[in-house]
Amino acid sequence: MEKKENISFPPWYDGENQKPENISVEVLNEIIEGAFHRIAGEYPEYQSRKDQIEMSKNILASLMNESVYIVEAGTGIGKSFAYLIAIIAYSYLTDERVIVTTETKNLQMQIFRKDIPSLKSLLGVDLAFELALGSSNYYCRLRHDEAFVEGKFRDLVSESELERYNTWTKEVNENKIHGHIFDMEKPFPEDFWKFIGRDPDGCPANKCLHFNYCNYYRAKAAWNNSKIIIANHHLFLYNLFNEKRTLPPYSAVVFDEAHGLIQSGQSILTHRFSTETIREVSRKFESRIKKSLPQEAYEEWSENWKNLESVWHVFFSSWEVQLSLNFEENSRKIIFEKQNIDTKECLFLLEKICDNIAELVIDEKDSGTLNALNGILKAVKKAMLFFTYYQHMNFEKMVYWGEKIHSRFYLFVCNLNLGDELSPLMTEGQVWTSATIGYWPFDKRPRDKADLLRGGYFRDFMSEAFGQSPESDMGMDFKTDYFESPFNYARQSVMYIPAHLSAPEWGASGGAKELYERNLMEEVLELIKLSGGGALVLFTSNYLLNHAGMIIKEQLNLPVFSQLEFGADLALKKFKETPNSVLLGTNSYWQGIDVTGKQLRSLIITKMMFTPPGDPLLQARSKILEKKNENPFMKISLPRSCLMLKQAFGRLIRSETDTGFVAILDSRLLHKNYGKRMLANLPDIPLVKTLADLKSVIKKNSLI
């Protein structure tokens, strides 16, 4: 690392006889210990944790060595403070910028609005911190003007909402607030925001008449002047795949909730186009192009575009027939073999249009027209990349599939291993942390930390995140670590798995499903009555969630808040505010939500979550493994299911004083051979198999 002249010790450390450019590991440890000592002195309620301090020391040492540190920190360790203190110290000692990236915007806002201000106050920190959001989260004055001139907002917001919007935009224009969507206590409807939020594909940038007042570019200027940026996985990955032109240069990155980076990456790297895509792009920009371009230029663009629409339709229709989806509905087919379907003509026309639009962009002065031209150019470049993937199909690295969704045919392509894409782009010091990263591939729990690390606990994660042989390919040092949750699960909770309740096998008859659902609902009702509310019930399907919501409302006199009815954020907020209520959720509630105290005292997981057999990535990876005579279920599906179960399990106990019970209403954990492995990946907790035993343990340990 190149040393800079204006480096210094952090403000809480007295380095009178030390030189910050040449400090020992002992001094680094003293710096971290000093920070936690000061916090304990300033904040009497703070509870010092040995593992938290050790984790923070390891992070600082790793960043100073520009290495990779992968650490699972169980719930309650305090990993946010551990890495924030370390990166603050690192930035003082090196004068370098650090990116912190999280899985969700809610966690991002918590770090920026709560954790960082607390540390700045407690430690006397004077570094510049900034929040970084994707550009579509920022208000755009150009699009606002167009939306109101053309009346695009009509029927989307009420008069009172419009008045609230005008008040908000006035504060934005007066620079009283940042101008992003999280400035609002209550966000505007998504259909409305899409007309006045920044359009990343069409933005005319410095040619826009509002450029000097643009909220997004003001935010980017603030990022450039900051030492620590709080981003999210989606934005961070977009920056990587955009040649690192979105975020300013940085020398280190911390991935919080690191397990979510893989899923975010797969979402970004999944390219999707439909038979109608090109026609929709044309319609979107037709009126602007027609009235803004010279007649000759418009006619050339129009002719090329009509030709493109024709060959585009032929290409997609050919694949639709080839996959036998032309008479199907809501079906999916994986492509395992290249077909004799021509891509060259589409690529030729796309390149021709791309060159034509690029020439028009150079001389265009009107901001609105530039917005339209840039939007077309971005769409065409994405389509060119997509067709390149279908021209040179590589079934070892990519997965291809077609889908019929609501009578529309789509083609998809996605990279099979995100690590292959990420590794060459990340040469900075890295910290990957989460409460659930690793997977224990054996039936019995390891005796100690050393056994766990030697037993391949992080092997699956490293393969996903870094590809094959990361140490040799990246030329970086790797260290893995593990800190167990400080919570006493054996005393604070109990786990109930009813031996009598079995989920039907995949593809079972309707009668078997009806019987299962009836038994499941009876069990859910009994458990909610047992805890008297204060229950989070997790589902793997929207149908069962809605069905349960109706039954609970009919038979129990308790407030019920459904994620599907109220939305994830509002339902969670209402649950936290309403004593003895019930919260019903699907996928997003399995991780990331935090409810402490008696408000949440029973966690009911209705069924284990496995990747659907029809998932394209699962099918493609399974085919590769089968060729190697390996078991796809044990290698792919089971580790993923364990991760989700660990995440869901972690919703119940969030502090040393929390108590309650976890009910997993899926007897496969008891009856299937793989159940032992799933239980070995959960914390050590008493297990009961009957409702009578559950009630006995609850009463004995005063859990509710």
Image: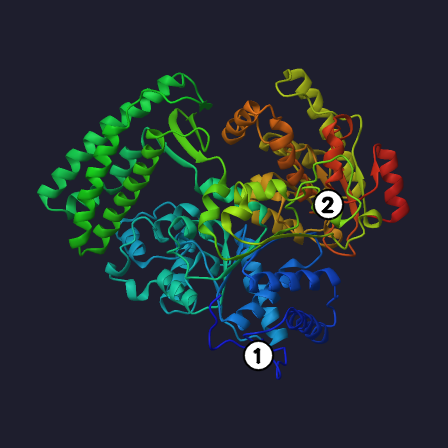
Q: What's under tag 2, amino acid-wise?
A: Leu
Q: Which residue extends farthest bottom?
A: 16
Point 76% across, 33% down: residue: 676
Q: Where 684 falls versus 11 (above or below)?
A: above
Q: Is residue 422 left or right of residue 289?
A: right
Q: Is residue 338 left or right of residue 593?
A: left
Q: Nearer the viewer, mark 2 or mark 1?
A: 1
Mark 2 → mark 1, Cα distance in angstroms = 39 Å
Q: Where 125 falls versus 195 (above or below)?
A: below
Point 45% across, 49% down: residue: 237
| Residue sitting nearer the eye, 439 or 542 | 439
How many C-alpha atoms fall within 10 Å of the one at disc 1: few (<14), some, or many (≥20)? few
Q: Position of residue 366 (x, y in %)?
A: 19, 55
Residue 388 quadrant: top left
Asked if residue 666 shows in the view, the reply is no
| Residue sitting nearer the eye, 261 or 695 | 261
Q: Where 333 falls versus 564 (above or below)?
A: above
Q: Position of residue 534 (x, y in %)?
A: 73, 46
Residue 563 quadrant: top right
Q: Which secondary structure, mark 1?
A: loop
| Residue sitting nearer the eye, 208 or 553 | 208
| Residue underneath mark 2 | 452
Q: Which secondary structure, mark 2?
A: helix
Q: Position of residue 615 (x, y in %)?
A: 52, 29
Q: Position of residue 67 (x, y in %)?
A: 56, 57
Q: Is residue 128 left or right of residue 136?
A: right
Q: Where 610 falls versus 61 (above or below)?
A: above
| Residue underneath mark 1 | 19
Tag 1 or tag 2, which sits nearer the N-term? 1
How many C-alpha atoms fall within 10 Å of the one at disc 2: few (<14), some, or many (≥20)? some
Q: What's under tag 1, amino acid-wise?
A: Lys
Asked if residue 648 shows in the view, the reply is yes
